[in-house]
Amino acid sequence: QIQLVESGGGLVQPGGSLTLSCTLSGNIFSTYIMGWYRQSPGNQRELVATIQFTKATNYADSVKGRFTISRDNARSTVSLQMNSLELEDTAVYYCHARNRYITSREYWGQGTQVTVST
């Protein structure tokens, strides 16, 4: 049974920083492409960033240059460093894992709230 456990959300002022973390348990971490998605009220869930086992990354245009995704394969952890946060970054952030051999196998974390507010 694969589990994704997230941590690190919270309230921050515009221009501030937060780091989200997600730990995968129940399977081999290297098997998975890891990512972060977010969803704000009234909007669809959208991709924020993904990272391959090779550590190749992909970012949404809206976060390029501000957010950094990383993974620690030894600790089965993926992190999202978020800098220069904007009001529009307010959302529930979800950790995501997709099996790189069987792409239909995907898993979601429970979500963590990030609120950017004055």
Image (tube, grey):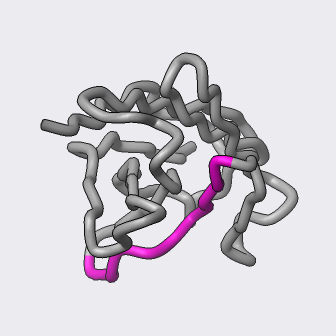
Q: Identify whether 78 is placed above or below 62.
A: above
Magenta region, residue range = 42-53
Quarter of the image for residue 46 reads: bottom left
Is residue 99 in the magenta section?
A: no
Q: Is residue 80 toward the left or the right of residue 32 in the image?
A: right
Name the residue at 78% across, 47% down.
84
Q: Quadrant of the C terminus?
A: top right
Q: Residue at x 74, y 48 (%)?
A: 55
Res. 10 in view: no
Residue 90 is situated, as x and y percent measured from the top left of the image, at: 47, 56
Q: Nearer the viewer, residue 27 or 15?
A: 27
What residue is rendered at 26% in x and 80% in y? 42
What x and y, as percent, mark residue 68? 75, 46
Q: Is residue 44 magenta?
A: yes
Instruction: Say if residue 70 shows up in the picture.
Output: yes
Image x and y of residue 74, in percent: 59, 19
Q: Residue furthest top?
A: 75
The extreme left residue here reads 1
